[in-house]
Image (tube, rainbow, N blue to C red):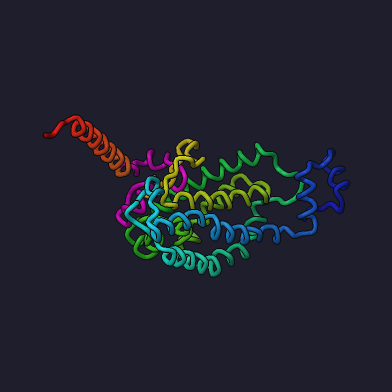
Amino acid sequence: MIPYATVEEGSMALGRNLTRLEKVWFDYSAAKSDYYLYCHNILFLFLIFSFVPLPLVIVESARSASGWFWFDRYKIQPKVAYSLSDMFRCYRDVMKMFILVVGPLQFISYPTIQMIEIRCGLPLPSLMEIVAQLVVYFLVEDYTNYWVHRLFHCKWGYEKIHHIHHEYTAPIGYAAPHAHWAEVLALGIPSFLGPAIAPGHMVTFWLWIALRQMEAIETHSGYDFPWSLTKYIPFYGGAEYHDYHHYVGGQSQSNFASVFTYCDYIYGTDKGYRFQKKLLHQIKEESKKGNKQTGGEKFD
């Protein structure tokens, strides 16, 4: 809760006038407890899990119901088509996990936010501060998630826990948070480590949780769209990269990384993926040569 009764008091405490965004933040949060602000994450996660995958649902439904195959050029596994009921079933399972695990976890985890001193007051962080902290959060989460994910692919971890997430060998957006409750809890640790190392403002924490889940949905989209802005991020894996991991399934010892590709490259767990890409490229090139030769021949 902001310890100032008025905007003027806040300005005097900071030694400057509040920015427009700081005034908006003051008007919204001044009378609200820090715990209440933290619990906004529950609403944000519900909205993200429910609505961010919807465009993908529309595209996939159009493919399977009406034979509209224009998007097949971007579909990573075009032979797989999910019906609306298939996708709703996945969403229903995700919402069950949200109600029973994710939501309650948000309610009871506030003491950890107090412990690492995520602040809710003034001043608001600068844009550069937010960007720098988000970069740290993504890098820390990506590295630690890599090892947790790799652990889940041991025989016991996969058979007892991780196999639920791999039920969708051709991923869809709603499958991003589709997992065993133990996996949901375990993967919460990498997500928390970044803010613990570089604690910031609650606004930055909201952005981190939202962007990480949106990235996971894109990674599990099943579509490799050329216009995706994430293609401009260095070492970013993306949907095509993670799709290979799901396609191989339980035997996969490749592409464990959640966001970037550097861990898989450093530890040699992208060899199967790179071999497949090289092989597919060779087949495509040979096919092009064959088509040219066939096109140049004349038949009587």
**Residue sitting at 41 percent across and 53 percent down?**
149
User: Which quadrant of the figure has residue 289?
Assistant: top left
Q: At x 37% / y 58%, what residue is drawn?
A: 81
The answer to whether 203 is drawn above or below residue 81 in the figure is: above
67 to 266, vertically: above or below: below
Frontmost residue, 160 versus 196:
160
Q: Is residue 259 visible?
A: yes
Q: Name the outermost residue toward the front.
A: 300
Residue segment shown in magenta: 244-271
Q: Position of residue 28 (x, y in %)?
A: 77, 54
Depicted 280 relative to depicted 62: above or below: above
Q: Position of residue 55 (x, y in %)?
A: 50, 54
Point 47% across, 67% down: residue: 93
Which quadrant: the N terminus? bottom right
> Magenta span has 200?
no
Residue 254 on the magenta span: yes
Using residue 157 as the reference point, say whether residue 297 is left or right of it. Answer: left
